[in-house]
Amino acid sequence: MPELLLGPLLRHVDDTSATVWVETSGACSVRIAAPGIAEQQVPTFQVEGRHYALVVLTGLRPATSHAYEVHLDGVTHWPQPGSSMPPSRIRTLPAGGDHDFLMLFGSCRKPESTDPKEHKKWGTDALAAYAVRMSGQDEVDWPDSMVLLGDQVYADETSKATQEWLSRRRDLDQAPGVEVKDLDEYVRLYHEAWSSPLIRWLLSTVPTSMIFDDHDVRDDWNTSQTWRDAIEATDWWAERERGALVSYWVYQHIGNLAPAELAEDKTFAAVLAHGRDGDAGPVLRAFAEAAAREVNGRKGTRWSYRRDFGNVRLLVIDTRSGRILRDGHRSMVGDGEFEWIEQNADGAYDHLLIGSSLPWLMPHAINHVQSVNEVSARRDGWRGRLAEKLRQGADLEHWPSFRASYDRLTRLVRRIAEGEAATVCVLSGDVHHVYAAEASFDRPVNARVWQLTCSPVHNAVERYMRPLFQLAWWKPLAAVTRWWMARNPAIEPLPVAWEKTAGPYFGNAVATLRVRGRRADVVIEKADSGADGPFLTPLPTIPLT
């Protein structure tokens, strides 16, 4: 009899449809059973011996709430017996564009650990603390959506439990050592990350969108062509990257897509065409190899996507897999994908949210140094080599280090802000501190424009980094680095200015974006633990309008 190994994960939800993802121990039929929802049963699909299903529910009524169960071959497997959590629910959005909306966001989450040293180092999981709060709330106060902005798993910084598991599989003295190597090992990471009871319930109840960042594959993934050449020279990287992209497609990407997009997705159709007993592994391996080639300027795939929530539009940008690095060209995404982003930024809404794992506006000193470093790394000789070492050693690979893409994104944000929107917000993570910064431009705009960064959800922030991040916001240092940048004729003047309005805050945290018509604000909450378990402490509210 098949078992429910992972999930359910509630993924895409709008006013009339929803998708629910599961992993099972064997081939079976998966049914989402809920009063008021027409029965929808689908067979699992198989990827290299593992079994999954993405159940698409359509024809739902707007603004309704349905407690649901997961049945495998007619047997109930969710909720789990004895669970003290409220029933998992599918809550559709109201019809129309003007309604209250609540979105969680954050990034960088290590798994929960039973090892005392890891538990102390990583602190309290902010998502677990949020689940505890939700379990005692009325569902009308639950968030409508959640966006996880990268580093859902850490392929290069594995836990002690995973390292012990790896040691029973292979010789850890051989590369890549305690890092994961293939698809089997990636599956282990996802199970470790999403199996704890609180997180499993949270993901079953809050519709969740995701995008990868570097640690989902490897630190500094695609930071430069030099980095790429070195990693491709190893005998293990090709299998590692293929496993990363296949697992990302299965565990994260397909759940980002709306039912209409899934119906048109050729890869999804090819996978389903193998049926419950055929294996679609070769299809996804070929797909992953094509996606990996995009970094070399060839057409691969588009991981970026769009979601609409009434008067809120979310555009999530892949800032890692689609980079163009060859022949001196450095682009965060290729021209074709950037055109897609620009086209999908147009529309009738009040609030545009741009999800980017990497911040657009950073602490000023770091921002300016990255622009200088990009130019310096192009030089021949020891100066160029030194700049490249600094780029990799200091993680100088954010938007400012891809200045052509940075400037293009800035022009897009300014164009939208000149229109009818009330706010344009770039939501980011990665940098292991929390801050809000408001942007201004060389001419007046109508919308308020924000960089909102929340990281980590559950990870360590090295003590020595905290004063460095604070110093990077210091205005005298910003002035010095800006002067240094302006002296280089190869660097265009910055097309945007910004002021930090909140932070930097350190420690595990989650951000809540609240929209009420054309009004919006953000609340940052820090996670901690007490005698009664994990809890959240709110920091001052940041008004966005």
Image (spheres, grey):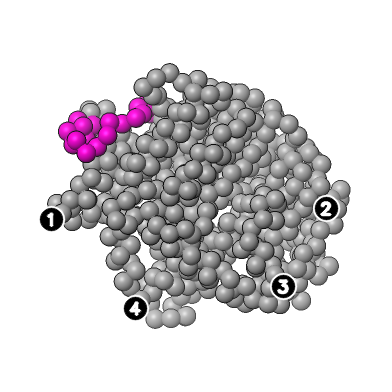
Across and down, in percent, residue 332 comes to 40, 48
Q: Is mark 4 on a helix, strand or loop?
A: loop
Q: Is residue 23 left or right of residue 64?
A: left
Residue occupying image coordinates x 67% and y 34%: 310
**Quadrant in which residue 137 is drawn:** top right
- Residue type at mark 3 is Gly
Image x and y of residue 113, in percent: 50, 61
Using the numbered discs, state the Cα–Cα distance from disc 1 to disc 4 in whole angstroms: 33 Å
Residue behind mark 2: 34
- Residue 309 in the image: above or below residue 126: above
Q: Name the secondary structure under disc 3.
A: loop
Q: Is mark 2 on a helix, strand or loop?
A: loop
Disc 4: which residue:
173
Of label 1 and label 3, which has the lower sequence position? 3
Stretch in magenta: 481-502
In the rendered structure, which disc, 1 or 4, sits on the residue that comes first in sequence?
4
- Which label was assigned to residue 275? 3
Q: Quadrant of residue 252?
A: bottom right
Q: Is residue 41 above or below residue 479?
A: below
Amino acid bearing label 1: Trp
For the residues marked 1 and 2, what is the alpha-carbon distance in whole angstroms? 65 Å
Q: Is residue 222 left or right of residue 104?
A: left
Secondary structure beneath label 1: helix
Mark 4 to mark 2 CA distance (whole Å): 50 Å
Q: Check disc 1: other Cα within 10 Å, few if <14, some if 14-19, many if 20+.
A: few
Callout 2 amino acid: Ala
For the residues labelled 4 and 3, the Cα–Cα distance comes to 40 Å
Label 4 CA crowd tier, 10 Å (few <14, some 14–19, many 20+): few
